[in-house]
Image (cartoon, rainbow, N blue to C red):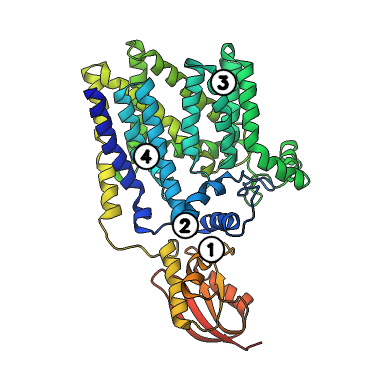
Amino acid sequence: MLNILRTNGVFIVIFLLAFFLRAQEVLTNNYLFLLDQGRDMMAVKKILFDHDLIFIGPNTSLSGVFQGPLHYYLLAPLTYVFNGDPIGAMITMLVISLLVIVAAYTFFLRYVGKTSALVVAYLFAISPEAIAAATYIWNPHPMWLLIVLTAILLFLVETVSEKFHLLLWPVIVLTFHFEMAFGVFLLLAVGIYIFGVRRNMTSRRYIFTGLLLSGIFLLPQILFDVRNDFLMSRSVTRVITGTSDQGLYAGNEHQTYISLMRGHMNALANNFRSSFPQFGWYLWYPYGMGVSTISAAILLYRQHVFSQNERDLIRITSIIVLLIVGLTFLYPFPLRYWFLTGFQSLYLVLVAVIVGAMFRSGTTVTFAAIVALSISIPYPIERLNVLYGNSTVETTSAKIQGKKEAFDFIYADANRKDFGLLVFTPPVLTDPYDYILFWYAAPKYGYKPHHEKRGLVYLLMEPDPSQYWSYKGWMETVVVDGDVLEETTLPSGIIVQKRMFDSK
């Protein structure tokens, strides 16, 4: 009992570390609010405030194919609680990221061991990509939780009860609402594992029921496909049959198989490295962890140190990783980095099992485990200093405070007069500003600007850092006329120009 209390006490410390590594944006109410975030919040607005249910989610890289809509509905409850403030969606991201740590720790504590449970919690707590998943609103981020749950449920299916098929398949299909590309890889990998590698553990009754239950989560996409003349089905068919010149190519870029696979290997290597700290002198750390844990695993297998549960978890997770990596070699398009969001969790699970066992092995191997973890300790300390050492709130055009300050400046300058607003952003779409106008500026100042070129009009322009002059082309083609009264560059870098047009 005392050991459990001590273990839980250490976990609380790790959990608090994880919280503060993830919560700076929430605590300062200043977070990234770019095109994807604006798009998501406009969809949530449609659900909550326009009372218009959405049956399809964000578009994928494949023309005509969409994610499921659950991402929007996941963001909706806390957004409603905070009266439309995107901070509710940010808190949702933070909670999901912390739930990953709780789920991994609870599972390891029950089936692997106290030491491994603390190790897995610590590795997830300081993983840079796991941290990033809590710091901005993005549909692939819940994949971290779903992939961890998939690994846990697959272990439980094989070692505890095949009744867990009833949860396994719905969880896998849920990934189609957040990152469909990896969801396909995961579904195929688990299917190959169950029906090919472990054919002796196939309870068809539970598998069939689990698949039937999982179909519920595909209903929105199925209904959308039927109502839109099978748009998604036709898009996928054209890619499979080679009759589409779009596919997943960005700008119709065509590559040889060798160059394509080289890109896949780079994407996979970068994904592995992002599992662990790799800044400054930490650049070598992911490779060191990979080589040392593989070497230790071979030694511990020979010494029969691993428990049966540890051996099962290592085998299951390793095979799933290898199957997913192998499937990418059949993938005929560029492997975008966001396709692999959350894949890092499988590496962290493997390393945690091995390092936890290293603590039981003996003096030399135990010392190596202590060194491997101790080396990483300066990283979270340094990150906390960066996050909280400076009390100044960053107000760039990428952060929501910078955008809000632009609206405050315009309304204050207009002095609540009848005025118009035209917005330029590098992606052209203005969703982030449209949402801030709806939720923040219009309610605060009691007036929503018109979007016509008449009377007093403000041009709100967000320059492209890589093509700073691009907004000038917009002024010379879209705006053109009107007398320039004043131009101001705000601390965020946003440019506000005041013009007077002939009244119509």
In the image, residue 14 lies at what x, y percent? 29, 37
Looking at the image, do the residues carrying marks 1 and 2 touch, with CB atoms under 8 Å apart? yes
Q: Residue visible at 28% across and 49% down? A: 384
Inter-mark Cα distance, 2 to 3:
40 Å
Which mark's residue is nearer the viewer, 1 or 3?
1
Callout 4 touching callout 3 (CB < 8 Å) = no
Q: Residue furthest right?
A: 229
Q: Which mark is residue 86?
A: 2
| Element class at badge 3 | helix
Image quadrant holding the N terminus, namely top left
Determine the CA span between mark 1 and mark 2.
9 Å
The amino acid at mark 2 is Pro
Upstream in sequence: badge 4 or badge 3: 4
- Helix, strand or loop at mark 1: helix
Q: CA distance from mark 2 to mark 4?
A: 25 Å
**Residue type beneath disc 1:** Tyr
Quadrant housing residue 36: bottom right
